[in-house]
Amino acid sequence: MARAADSLSPGRFSLDSLGPWLPKDVAWQGQLDAEIALDLPASGPRGRVSVDAGRGSWRIREQEQWLAFAYDELRLDSQLRAEGSMPASCCAARRSASCRCRPRSTRVRRTSR
């Protein structure tokens, strides 16, 4: 039995609110925005998760001094598929050099202010 797609957008919240769950020598300042879209058909779950922490900073205490690590962009975009599922036209069993079904590596981009 197929179920209609659900979408959740919890809105922005302050990363300072994670303080109680972080080690006492770590602080995270900024805002987090997320969007989750999930479809649960009989063939298995599929969906998308997008998390954007925008601009912010991590602060880590070393001895008596706080060290700040600022970032301009921190973002995660992920496509979700049931294990073993692939689009029906999966580039002729991945023989095509332009196949978009292959797992893509995660890129981390560091920018400085």
Image (tube, helix red, strand yellow):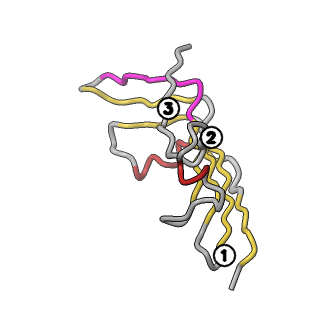
* Residue at mark 3 to residue at mark 2: CA–CA distance: 15 Å
Ranked by sequence position, the earlier of labels 1 and 2 is: 1
Vertical comparison of 87 with 4: above or below: above
Q: Which residue is mark 1?
A: 41
Q: Is residue 111 left or right of residue 39?
A: left
Residue situated in front as seen by the camera: 16 or 46: 46
Q: Residue at x 59, y 52 (%)?
A: 92
Amino acid type at image mark 1: Pro
Residue 59 percent across, percent down from the top left: 42, 29
Residue depth check, mark 1 versus mark 2: number of the one nearer the observer: 1
Vertical comparison of 81 with 27: above or below: below
Considering the numbered disc 2 on the image, is that residue within a helix, a strand or a loop?
strand
Which segment did they paint magenta?
65-74
Quadrant housing the C terminus: top right
* Quadrant housing residue 38: bottom right
Ranked by sequence position, the earlier of labels 1 and 3 is: 1
Other residues around mark 1 within 10 Å, as few (<14) / some (14–19) / many (≥20): few
Q: Is residue 56 left or right of residue 6?
A: left
Q: Which residue is mark 2?
A: 52
Vertical comparison of 69 with 43: above or below: above
Magenta segment main secondary structure: strand
Residue 111 percent across, percent down from the top left: 53, 18
Q: Residue at x 65, y 73 (%)?
A: 40
Residue depth check, mark 3 versus mark 2: number of the one nearer the observer: 3
Amino acid type at image mark 2: Asp
Other residues around mark 2 within 10 Å, as few (<14) / some (14–19) / many (≥20): some
Residue situated in front as seen by the camera: 45 or 92: 92
Query: Outermost residue toward the left?
Result: 63
